[in-house]
C-alpha cells in the first residue's frame, strides 16, 4: 500500500506510520473500494492516551473531546472544543491512502502538523518526498 502524507509519497508500506519511534497510525484497506480501516492513538501533553480509534471506530474518547466522521472511503477526527482537524484520511486509489490534514501530539508531547504541502514535527519537516519503504513502516520525526 502507498501512503501520501501531505505532499510526501511513501510507497510499498505495511500501512503503519511511526511518529518519533512509536507506531501511532495504522491504515488498512479491506477491499479495493474500501472500507478504510484506521487505528490511531491521540496523546495529550504528558504522553497519556486521550482518544483511540480501532478499526475506524472510537474505542476511547476521554471527556468526549473528539468527534469522528467516517464513510467507507474516508475518516475525519476533530477536536470538538477547538474544531481542529486532528486527522483526515481518504482512500485516493485502490491501494493508495491520503493523509490530508493532521494536527496531533506525539507520545513525546511534540506537535505533528500535516498540511497538503508538508508534514512537520519539532524542527523536522518534509515536503515533496518520494520514498520506497520496502514493505516497512513510514517513519516521521
Image: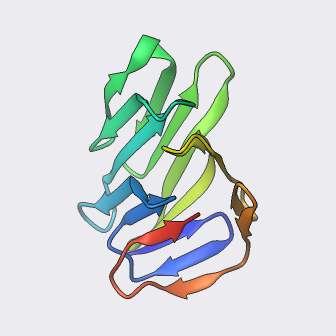
Residue 71 percent location from the top left of the image = 41, 42
Quarter of the image that includes the N terminus: bottom left
**Which color scheme does this rendered protein use?**
rainbow
Residue at (41% x, 56% y) in the render: 22
Residue 52 appears left or right of 92 = left
| Residue drawn at the location 33% of the way across and 82% of the way down | 135
> What residue lies at 23% left-to-right and 60% top-to-bottom?
30
Residue 19 lies, with reference to residue 94, above or below; the image says above
Which of 19/135 is in front? 19
- Snapshot quadrant of residue 105: top right
Q: Where the C terminus falls, by quadrant? A: bottom right
Please, which residue is most extreme toward the top here? 63
Compare residues 107 and 70 and report the one nearer the observer. Answer: 107
The x, y position of residue 87, in whole percent, is 55, 43
Task: Give the number of marks.
Answer: 0
Residue 67 drawn above or below residue 27 = above
Q: Residue at x 36, y 58 (%)?
A: 27
Q: Is residue 47 above or below residue 130?
A: above
* Quarter residue 57 falls in: top left
Give residue 126's position: percent from left, percent from top. 70, 71
Amino acid at each position: 500500500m502507498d501512503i501520501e502524507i501531505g505532499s510526501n509519497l511513501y510507497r510499498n508500506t505495511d500501512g503503519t506510520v511511526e511518529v518519533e519511534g512509536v507506531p501511532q497510525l495504522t491504515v488498512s484497506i479491506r477491499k479495493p473500494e474500501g472500507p478504510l480501516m484506521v487505528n490511531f492513538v491521540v496523546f495529550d501533553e504528558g504522553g497519556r492516551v486521550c482518544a483511540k480509534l480501532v478499526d475506524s471506530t472510537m474505542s476511547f474518547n476521554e471527556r468526549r473531546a473528539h468527534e469522528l466522521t467516517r464513510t467507507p472511503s474516508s475518516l475525519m477526527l476533530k477536536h470538538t472544543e477547538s474544531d481542529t482537524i486532528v486527522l483526515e484520511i481518504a482512500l485516493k486509489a485502490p491501494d493508495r491512502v491520503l493523509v490530508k490534514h493532521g494536527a496531533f501530539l506525539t507520545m513525546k508531547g511534540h506537535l505533528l502538523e500535516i498540511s497538503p504541502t508538508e508534514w512537520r514535527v519539532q524542527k523536522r519537516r518534509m515536503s515533496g518526498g518520494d520514498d520506497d519503504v520496502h514493505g516497512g513502516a513510514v517513519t516521521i520525526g
